[in-house]
Image (cartoon, helix red, strand yellow):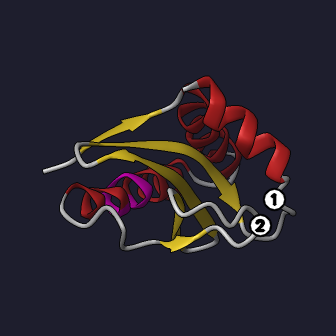
Amino acid sequence: MVKVEYTQQAISDIDDIANYISNDSSYYASLQVEKLFNKTEILEYHPHIGRVVPELNIKSVRELIEGNYRIIYRVVNKGCIHILTIHHSRKQLKPARIKRIYRKK
């Protein structure tokens, strides 16, 4: 089983998503957060299930899709994955931002 760790950026992203959605509905905000966390559970047993992030083309940086969100993660080694960021699919992904997060962790 692989350990899944969240970067500070990913936690901040989830908080921002929850705050934004809660302006309309706290119920749907908590539901979306739960879906995001549940989606990453599959990585504990299948770390390479996500596709390589096309903007980066780095084999160890992959993504899962949950609704309108891209869960971008890095396979560090056989025992560890870092969730780098949660990104809304309508927004342009800036590779430099991901690389900066990638280097911090």
Q: Amino acid at mark 2?
A: Glu
Secondary structure at numbered mark 1: loop
Q: Which residues are magenta?
A: 35-39
Circle 1: is it few (<14), some (14-19), or many (20+) Cα within 10 Å? some
Which residue position is annotated with label 2? 55
Give the tally of numbered discs.
Answer: 2
> Which image quadrant is residue 5 in?
top left
In this view, 47 is above or below 30? below
Label at residue 93: 1
Q: Which mark is residue 23?
A: none
Labels 2 & 1 near each other (Cβ < 8 A): yes
Asked if the magenta segment contains residue 45, the reply would be no
- Is 70 rendered above or below residue 78? below
Residue at 62% over, 37% down: 102
Residue mark closest to the camera, 2 vs 1 = 2
Q: Report the residue at 46% width, 53% height from top.
A: 27
Question: Residue at left 53%, top 65%?
Answer: 63
